[in-house]
Image: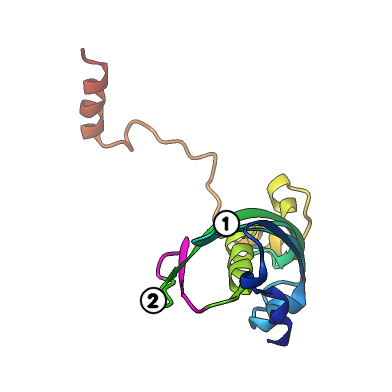
């Protein structure tokens, strides 16, 4: 967690106004969180930190690529991500992070660590299902894809439903669509 010091912002020494912070995120950042789902990470995160007299406004923006394994074929590929997140930091009696967009810190606090918010921003920017672009456009050739096609149940295109196979009650219901 020694590397997390770089993500601590001592806001007491900052003047009222806007301040910019840039972070280059790589694998070492995620190792501190014990997250090892990425093969490689190259994400640039920008933080617009606006200090006001009674609160702080933080606007995060992450953009870059993460190398992940495809959920279908387990082939590694670079996935482009881009996401934003806004956080308001208010001052109160007790620490409270129940609301995901508002953080309340005690009045005596003088710094804030943004590493957790950057971590969550990048993780939540990932789609639920990570599919290799070669699968979507049909250019990926893989043994796993061939095996999946071989084992998938296929519909026989030669079988046609005849009127005898259809339940006659449906025909009565179909008349309702044409009756006016």
Residue 19 image point, x, y percent: 69, 58
Which colour style is shown?
Answer: rainbow
Which residues, given as a range, are shown in magenta? 98-108
Where is mark 1, residue-wise?
85
Which residue lies most toward the top here? 180
CA distance for labels 1 and 2: 25 Å
Asked if residue 134 is among those painted magenta in the image, a careful observer would answer no
In front here: 67 or 104? 104
- What residue is shown at x 69% (from left), y 55% (from top)? 81
Which residue lies most toward the bottom here? 2
Q: Quadrant of residue 147?
A: bottom right
Determine whether 154 is above or below 28 in the image.
above
Label 1 element class = strand
Residue 93 image point, x, y percent: 39, 76
Q: In which quarter of the image is residue 165?
A: top left
Q: Earlier in the sequence, mark 1 or mark 2?
A: 1
Q: How crowded is mark 2: few (under 14 residues within 10 Å), some or many (20 or more)?
A: few
Determine whether 43 is above or below 165 in the image.
below
- What residue is shown at x 21% (from left), y 15% (from top)? 179
Q: Using the rendered image of the protein, determine whether residue 3 is visible from the camera's viewpoint.
A: yes
Q: Quadrant of residue 116?
A: bottom right
Q: Quadrant of the N terminus?
A: bottom right
Q: In which quarter of the image is the C terminus?
A: top left
Where is mark 2, residue-wise?
93
Q: Are marks 1 and 2 in contact (CB under 8 Å)?
A: no
Q: How crowded is mark 1: few (under 14 residues within 10 Å), some or many (20 or more)?
A: some
- For residue 5, side relative to residue 90 (left or right): right
């Amino acid at each position: 967690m020694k590397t997390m010091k770089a993500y601590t912002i001592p806001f007491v020494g900052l003047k009222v106004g806007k301040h910019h912070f840039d972070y280059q995120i790589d694998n070492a950042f995620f190792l501190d969180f014990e997250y090892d789902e990425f093969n490689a990470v190259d994400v640039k995160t920008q933080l617009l930190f606006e200090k006001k007299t009674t609160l702080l406004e933080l606007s995060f923006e992450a953009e870059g690529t993460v190398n992940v394994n495809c959920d279908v074929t387990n082939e590694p590929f670079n996935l482009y991500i881009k996401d934003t997140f806004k956080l308001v930091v208010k001052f109160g009696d007790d620490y409270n992070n129940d609301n995901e967009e508002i953080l309340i810190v005690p009045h005596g606090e003088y710094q804030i660590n943004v590493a957790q918010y950057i971590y969550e921003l990048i993780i939540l920017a990932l789609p639920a299902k990570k599919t290799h672009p070669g699968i979507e456009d049909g250019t990926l050739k893989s043994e796993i894809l061939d095996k999946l096609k071989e084992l998938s149940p296929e519909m026989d295109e030669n079988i046609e439903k005849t009127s005898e196979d259809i339940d006659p009650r449906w025909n009565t219901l179909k008349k309702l669509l044409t009756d006016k």
